[in-house]
Amino acid sequence: MSREDQSYSEKRNFIRMNIPAGTEVTLKLDEKTLKGECINLSGSGLLVATREKLPEDVTLLAEVSSHYGHAPTLSARARVVRSETTNQQTWESGLEILEIID
């Protein structure tokens, strides 16, 4: 089946994986560190929920950690491509992965 024959949700280069609830993400932007929750992850980006809006087009360090005792499951330099409020207390931000860090 060609990409054109696939449904719209399947036309991505990387499929999104929903992450178990409570998976933490630490975001380091300049001297500021924010904690949040990773909602989903793909080969090219991630969706995170935080208590404050992330400025768009800013590069930051994102570290995703599991509750299973692993050192960061993912550590990456990422760019904020969008940040939208879902209610008065939570912001969802789409991050584009620029580089995976060992």
Image (cartoon, grey):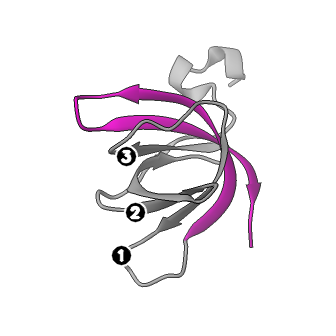
* Quadrant location, the C terminus: bottom right
Question: Label 1 amino acid?
Answer: His
Observer-nearest of 96 and 20: 96
* Magenta-drawn stretch contains 97: yes
Observer-nearest of 76 and 35: 35
Judging by the rendered image, the residue that carries numbered circle 3 is: 50
Looking at the image, the residue that sits furthest to the front is 31
Indicate which disc, 2 or 3, sits on the residue closer to the N terminus: 2
- For the residues bearing labels 2 and 1, Cβ distance under 8 angstroms: yes
Indicate which disc, 2 or 1, sits on the residue closer to the N terminus: 2
- Per the rendering, the mark at residue 67 is 1
Residue 19 vertical position relative to residue 79 in the rendered view, above or below: below
Observer-nearest of 50 and 47: 50
Question: Label 2 amino acid?
Answer: Glu
The segment highlighted magenta reads: 73-102
Q: Is residue 4 left or right of residue 28?
A: right
Q: Nearer the viewer, mark 2 or mark 1?
A: 2
Instruction: Residue 99: give x, y in percent of width and height.
Output: 77, 54
Instruction: Residue 51: give x, y in percent of width and height.
Output: 32, 44
Q: Measure the alpha-carbon separation of dots 2 and 3.
A: 10 Å
Q: What's the residue at 43%, 36% (across, down)? A: 53
- Per the rendering, the mark at residue 24 is 2
Q: What's the residue at 64%, 16% (across, down)? A: 5
